[in-house]
C-alpha cells in the first residue's frame, strides 16, 4: 500500500547521487561530522531504546555506527560503494561487533524479505533519493508490525530568506547529491496515504533547528 507523496520532489537521480558521493567520500566526515552529529545521536538513541535487528538506510561512511549499543544489530545499505568502504574501515578500526553487514543497495529497491527488521533508521537520506515516498514504502515494508521507522532530515523553510536560499541551492541539487529544499508535505502526504503507520514524534534538533527527528510506528 503506497502513500501519497504530496508535491513532486524532482531534480535528482541515482546517477547524480552515485557521482556526487564518490566525490564526497574522501572528505565527507571532515565536512559533515560536527553539524550532523546531534541528529545522528538522536536517531541512535531512539534505536537503542528499541534494539533488535535494525536496518540503517543510507549508512554512508558509518558516522552513526559507533553510537549504536550492542542490543541493536545493524545491517547498513548505501548506494555509494566509496562511502561504504569508509564505513567498513570504521567498523574494523573500532571493532563494532554488532554491525552484521554493510551492502551496496538502492534504498528504493531493497532486496530483503518483508518484515525483516525490528526497526529502520535513515539519517539525512530523504533528501538524497529520487523518490522519497518510495523509500518510505520500502522501509515500511521491511519493518515488522510493532516496529519503528526513525528519520532525521532537513525540512525546508516555507518562506523568507532561508527558503529563497534553499531554492537557489536546489537548482544545484544534482551536483550536491541532495535537495536543500524539502517540504514537510512530502512526509505528511505519505503518512496520510497509509493506514499501517503512525507519526509518534516530530521535533527539531540542534544546531539551530536545522534538522528534524521523525519517529513513525509501524502498526
Image (tube, grey):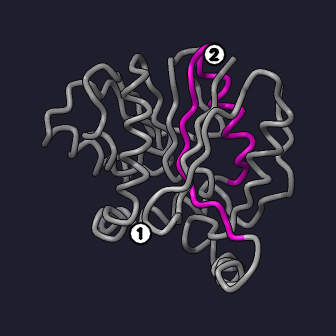
Which residues are the magenta region?
Answer: 130-157
Q: Quadrant of residue 166?
A: bottom right
Q: Is residue 17 above or below residue 42?
A: below
Q: Which mark is residue 114?
A: 2
State the image coordinates of residue 193 (x, y, percent, origin top left). Answer: 86, 34
The tag earlier along the polypeptide, 2 or 1, is: 1
Residue at 73% across, 55% down: 184
Q: Is residue 150 above or below residue 181?
A: above
Residue 59 placement, left or right of 216: left
Q: Is residue 115 above or below residue 6?
A: above
State the image coordinates of residue 125 (x, y, percent, origin top left). Answer: 55, 51
Q: Residues within 10 Å of mark 1 (few under 14, many from 20)?
A: some
Residue at 54% across, 15% down: 116
Q: Is residue 117 above or below residue 135?
A: above
Residue 209 placement, left or right of 38: right
Q: Residues within 10 Å of mark 2 (few under 14, many from 20)?
A: few
Q: Quadrant of residue 136?
A: top right
Pick the front one: 22 or 47: 47
Pick the front one: 188 or 84: 188
State the image coordinates of residue 165 (x, y, percent, origin top left). Answer: 65, 84
> What residue is shown with label 1?
23
Check if residue 159 falls in the magenta segment: no
Q: Tag count in the figure? A: 2
Amino acid at each position: 500500500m503506497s502513500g501519497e507523496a504530496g508535491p513532486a520532489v524532482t531534480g535528482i537521480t541515482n546517477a547524480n547521487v552515485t557521482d556526487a558521493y564518490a566525490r564526497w567520500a574522501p572528505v565527507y566526515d571532515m565536512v559533515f561530522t560536527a553539524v550532523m552529529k546531534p541528529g545522528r545521536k538522536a536517531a541512535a538513541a531512539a534505536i537503542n531504546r528499541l534494539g533488535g535487528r535494525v536496518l540503517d538506510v543510507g549508512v554512508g561512511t558509518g558516522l552513526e555506527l559507533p553510537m549504536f549499543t550492542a542490543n541493536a544489530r545493524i545491517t547498513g545499505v548505501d548506494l555509494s560503494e566509496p562511502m561504504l568502504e569508509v564505513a567498513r574501515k570504521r567498523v574494523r578500526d573500532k571493532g563494532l561487533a554488532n554491525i552484521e553487514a554493510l551492502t551496496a543497495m538502492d534504498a528504493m529497491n531493497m532486496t530483503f524479505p518483508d518484515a525483516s527488521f525490528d526497526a529502520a533508521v535513515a539519517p539525512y537520506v530523504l533528501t538524497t533519493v529520487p523518490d522519497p515516498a518510495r523509500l518510505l514504502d520500502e522501509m515500511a515494508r521491511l519493518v515488522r508490525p510493532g516496529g519503528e521507522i526513525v528519520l532525521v532530515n532537513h525540512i525546508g523553510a516555507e518562506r523568507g530568506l532561508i527558503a529563497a536560499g534553499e531554492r537557489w541551492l536546489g537548482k544545484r541539487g544534482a551536483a550536491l547529491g541532495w535537495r536543500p529544499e524539502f517540504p514537510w508535505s512530502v512526509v505528511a502526504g505519505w503518512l496520510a496515504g497509509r493506514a499501517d503507520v503512525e507519526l509518534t514524534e516530530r521535533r527539531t534538533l540542534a544546531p539551530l533547528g536545522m534538522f528534524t527527528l521523525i519517529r513513525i510506528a509501524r502498526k
